[in-house]
Amino acid sequence: INENMLGKFGILITILVLVFLFFIVISLGAGAFSKDQLKPETKRYLKSVNILLAVIAIVGTILVLFL
C-alpha cells in the first residue's frame, strides 16, 4: 500500500464519519431518539435525509476509491 492509498482511505473514513455525525445530529434534532411518537411528516423527513446521506456516502466512496 502506497502513501496515496493511505491518504484516500483517510479521506474516505473522514467522509463516512461526517455523514454518520450528520445522521446523529439531524435525528436528535428531529426527535427520533425520544420516547414520544413521531409525526408522519417527521418520519418522511428523516427517511428523505437518510436517503440523501446514503447517496452522499456512496458518491464519496466511489470518488475516493476510483479517482
Image (cartoon, rainbow, N blue to C red):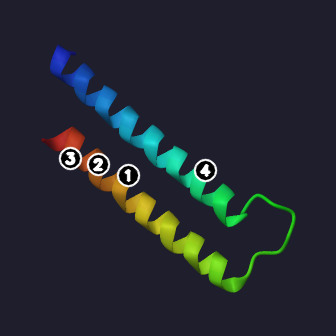
Q: CA distance from mark 4 to mark 2?
A: 19 Å
Q: Label 4 belongs to which residue?
A: 24
Query: Residue 3, which numbered label?
Result: none
Q: Label 3 belongs to which residue?
A: 63
Q: Secondary structure at mark 4?
A: helix
Q: Residues within 10 Å of mark 4 (few under 14, many from 20)?
A: some
Viewed as shown, does residue 51 lie left or right of 4? Answer: right
Q: Label 2 belongs to which residue?
A: 60
Q: Where's residue 31, x and y in %?
A: 73, 64
Q: Are marks 2 and 3 in contact (CB under 8 Å)?
A: yes
**N-term mark: 4 or 2:** 4
Q: CA distance from mark 4 to mark 1?
A: 15 Å
Q: CA distance from mark 2 to mark 3?
A: 5 Å
Q: Nearer the viewer, mark 3 or mark 4?
A: 4
Q: Are marks 2 and 1 in contact (CB under 8 Å)?
A: yes
The structure residue drawn at horizontal position 37% and vertical position 51%, both measured from the top left corner, is 57
